[in-house]
Image (cartoon, rainbow, N blue to C red):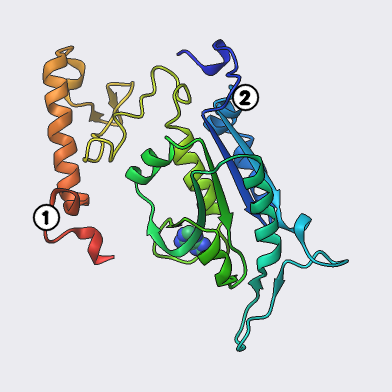
Amino acid sequence: MSTTKDRPRREEPYLRIDILSVVPQTFESVLGASIIKRALEAGLVEIVVHNLHDYGLGRYKQVDDTPYGGGAGMILRPEPIFECIERLKSERAYDDVIFLTPDGDLFTQAAANRLSMARAIILLCGHYKGIDERVRTALVTREISIGDYVLTGGELPALVVADAVVRLLPGALGDSESALSDSFQGGLLDAPYYTKPAEYRGITVPDVLTSGDHARIAEWREAEALKRTRERRGSMLGDEDDPVRGG
Ligand code: ADE
């Protein structure tokens, strides 16, 4: 397998991602591992994590406050977010300022494909109960949810988005790992895969895969992908009774 280690580091990254968070430590382990780490090292992407406390107010670097009108939970104040984003925008142009929120547009492969074409994006992570609405109306250009459930903050969703986008950048996957055959890319889920041994605990690999007949293998994969998509994501094929809708 050819890895990015064999290639020279790119001078200019394809994409710059700025992540704004009140818990920047969350990102260390994921950004220091796997395909994202490799893409960072190869200069394909630049990811900068900003600690919103650095823009906090007063001696205690306050970033949140109680909601006007009362209610439980704290709200991120607008000043640290405005200051951080305005500073970044004075340095370069951004294609999108994305707020991760459960009431955003559901994240899809199509959205990941589109974001992988951007030059620079900001991922804004909410925390606590929410963020001041003025940030959303004045600064945010796109709102993304990674699913219909509520997490403690936007940090894990930001990592999900970053991972899905970075692996699409040219050279992020080794030559042998293609993103084109991923589930969703061709409008279908991916076919099942097998590796050695040909028989394990009495379960054998389908004969066609060991036949060496590439045309038959391609046909089998297409049929299996279709079958799997129909069973698991009928809505992708326009089926009415998609099992996913049952929750
Ligand atoms: N923040 C909290 N929950 C979230 C979700 N499901 N998607 C995006 N951001 C979130």
The answer to whether mark 2 is within 8 Å of ligand 1 is no
**Total numbered labels:** 2
- Pick whichever, 193 or 6, lies toward us: 6
The quadrant the C terminus occupies is bottom left
Q: Residue furthest front?
A: 90
Residue 68: x percent and y percent? 63, 84
User: In this view of the protein, can residue 106 be seen by the observer?
Assistant: yes
Residue 80 coordinates in the image, percent (x, y): 71, 61
Determine which quarter of the picture holds residue 220.
top left
Q: Mark 2 is on which residue type? A: Glu
Residue type, numbered disc 1:
Asp
Q: Which residue is mark 2?
A: 41
Q: Is residue 172 above or below residue 238?
A: above
Would residue 181 appear left or right of 160 to someone viewing this image? left
Residue 9 position (above or below residue 155): above
The answer to which quarter of the image holds residue 210 is: top left
Residue at the (13%, 61%) spot, across then down:
241
Q: Nearer the viewer, residue 28 or 104?
A: 104
User: Along the line of sight, which residue is nearer the eye, 50 or 176?
Assistant: 50
At horizontal 62% and vertical 46% (from top left) the residue drawn is 89
Q: Earlier in the sequence, mark 1 or mark 2?
A: 2
Place of residue 96 in the rendered image (x, y in percent of width and height, measured from the top left): 49, 48
Crowding near the residue tagged with mark 1, few <14, some 14–19, many ≥20 C-alpha atoms within 10 Å: few
Of residues 187 and 33, the one nearer the viewer is: 187
Q: Quadrant of the N terminus?
A: top left
Secondary structure type for disc 1: loop
Q: Secondary structure at mark 2?
A: helix
Q: Which residue is mark 1?
A: 239
Q: CA distance from mark 1 to mark 2?
A: 44 Å
Contact between labelled residues 2 and 1, with CB atoms less than 8 Å apart: no
Image x and y of residue 231, in percent? 17, 50
